Image: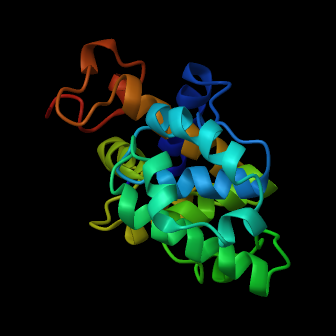
Amino acid sequence: MINLAQLNQILAALGAAYPNAKTELHFGSPYELLIATMLSAQTTDRQVNQVTPVLFSHFPTPEALATADPRYVAELIKGVGLHNTKARHLVATAKILLERFQCQVPQTLAELLTLPGVGRKTAKVVLANAFGKPALAVDTHVFRVSRRLGLAGGNTPEQVEKELEDTIPSHEWIATHHRLIQHGRRVCKARNPLCDQCSLSDKCPSATQV
């Protein structure tokens, strides 16, 4: 694992490279972000952004979605992966929001995890981006890039999440999440990382190993 000085250098370099990094999902409310994030599993943000305008025009509130036929919802979101399963989860989640949470998206990790189809990554994305609460969601990009940079060494997203949150100051969690994602998408790609174009290569223990 890296020491504090190395950590600060990496965080500073990420900040310089991606000063305005933020979620690329389009949303106008916590409800819309929750739905969009649920749809984003195994699907690109671009694909999600293509289907959510139509979905939200039909079901702008949890009340509306709670009474929907999952088969109809599946047709509306057909452009995303696992659309049939996700449609069932969306309707079931809307029903719980209606029945237990007065149609409000809950603001605690424990409550969010009670929603069908919502795991730790989705819950933490919602906490961070809808409510500004310190949370560091670990998706495939965060998992890969943080391990390559030596920020974490865990073998599961949960282990990496704990390592990152134990090491990085909480006020940096949200920004670091977005910056690691941007770096993973643009430079530190899964199969062919662009190490020769990477501004962090001199700080990366994996740069000469890929």
What x and y, as percent, mark residue 83? Answer: 38, 55
Q: Nearer the viewer, residue 20 or 26?
A: 26
**Does the image show residue 165?**
no
Residue 75 image point, x, y percent = 44, 50
- Look at the picture and state if 2 lies above or below 13: below
Q: Looking at the image, which residue is at 51% across and 44% down?
A: 7
How is this picture coloured? rainbow
* Image quadrant where one finds the N terminus: bottom left
Q: Residue at x 73, y 58 (%)?
A: 31
- In the current view of this chain or complex, which residue is farthest to the left? 209
Question: Which residue: 54% across, 61% down?
Answer: 122
Q: Is residue 157 in view?
A: yes
In the figure, 190 relative to 87: above or below? above
In the image: residue 77, left or right of residue 18 = left
Seen from the viewer's position, the closer of residues 207 and 32 is 32
> Residue 69's spot in the image, x, y percent?
54, 67
- As drawn, the residue found furthest toward the top would be 197
Q: In the rendered image, which quarter contains the C terminus?
A: top left
Q: In this image, 2 relative to 176: left or right?
A: left
Viewer-closest of 171 and 202: 171
The reply, left or right, for residue 203 in relation to residue 177 is: left
Q: Residue at left 61%, top 39%?
A: 54
Give the percent coordinates (x, y) of residue 118.
Answer: 53, 70
